[in-house]
Amino acid sequence: MHSPDPPRQLLVALRKSALSLCHAQYIRDRLLAIYPECDVMLRGITTQGDRVLDQPLAEIGGKGLFIQEIETAMLEGRADFAVHSLKDMPMEMAPGFTIAAVPIREDPRDALVCNAWASIDALPDGAVVGTSSLRREAQLRERRPTLKVKLLRGNVNTRVKKLDEGQYDAMILAAAGLNRLEQGHRASALLDPGVFLPAVGQGALALECPIARADVIEWLKPLIHHPTLLAITAERAFSHALSGSCHTPIGGYATFRGGELWLRGLIASRDGTDILRGERTAALDPESGPMAQAEALGRALADEFLARGAQRFISA
């Protein structure tokens, strides 16, 4: 394919939040290093997911609420591509759209944010822990069933303010978001993925654009980080094969160990009393491994989970 001329202007869509702005500014800086003559403009869009903050996502339509208006903006020509947190992307892409690039992943771990205690185990019985994630809730309840888990929505700064005001004793947030906002010092502990599995795609960004925009897809190629792309491909294949959604507590995390891609997964009941965990590896070169092999790894782990009875979580 003939490479298009360098872009003169790129319109980047993003959610209207401080964290989304940090993500988009990071991508803008990466693009300007490659295309110094390009005018990269950021366009903030308020989504339905940002407007409704008093209900769980699972009850109001799921993660797609964060991207529908943004996809409309791309279709109408008001944006060339969009920057998303990959963990906010539905497993089924909307028709006509693709993930054009996945840059290098930030810290994938969850973080405990707490002003008084340094670990989950140190929290007193009855302590109120905030999260909007069923995955986090299930793992918290499994580990500490005497804690009180309370809904927590809103942007990162709003959430941390609620902690400082005493509305919560602690909360679980993504380490990547804290780091991007230069709030990493607020983390009391970073949770080991071996005992507290992250969300599929956590810490990674997704650059989405219409499939028809071959020029944009080509311009974004230099931002692809192949090891991250292979890892999130395996994770998303695992979740997709298990019908992963906001309604199902599900986690997945893939990383390279030597020449192998190592995928860990879990699916659980919301109350944490029933959790399936598993792992699987595949020999893959992190720099040139085929995407199909990473996808097959995710599906194979999902098949193993289904053979072990995972359908009970999906049906519930």
Image (tube, grey):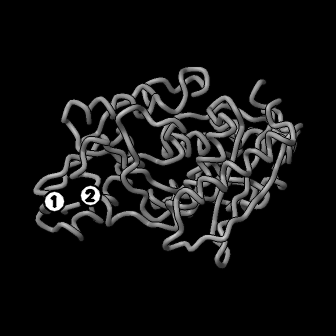
Counting other residues with Cα less than 10 Å from the Cα at mark 2, is it few (<14), some (14-19), or many (20 or more)?
some
**Relative height, residue 249 to residue 116 (above, below):** above
SS at badge 2? helix
In depth, the one of 40 and 243 nearer the eye is: 243
Q: Identify which residue is drawn at 39% across, 29% down.
A: 68
Question: Which quadrant: the N terminus?
Answer: bottom left
Q: Position of residue 128 (x, y in %)?
A: 74, 38
In depth, the one of 150 and 89 nearer the eye is: 89
User: How many numbered marks are there?
Assistant: 2
Q: Position of residue 167 (x, y in %)?
A: 65, 36
Q: Which residue is mark 2?
A: 218
What's the amino acid at mark 2?
Glu
Q: Identify which residue is drawn at 79% across, 35% down.
A: 148
The earlier-in-sequence mark between 2 and 1 is 1
Dots 2 and 1: beta carbons under 8 Å?
yes
What's the amino acid at mark 1?
Pro
Q: Quick one: which residue is furthest to the front in this view?
A: 1
Q: Which residue is mark 1?
A: 4
Q: Quick one: which residue is furthest to the bottom in this view?
A: 258
**Relative height, residue 100 to residue 90 (above, below):** below
Q: Identify which residue is drawn at 40% across, 48% down.
A: 99
128 relative position to 244: left or right: right
32 relative position to 266: left or right: left
12 relative position to 244: left or right: left
Q: Position of residue 150 (x, y in %)?
A: 70, 32
In depth, the one of 175 and 276 nearer the eye is: 276
Q: Quick one: which residue is furthest to the top in this view?
A: 60
Q: Identify which residue is drawn at 19% across, 54% down.
A: 40
Q: CA distance from mark 2 to mark 1?
A: 7 Å
SS at badge 1? loop
Question: Which quadrant: the C terminus?
Answer: top right
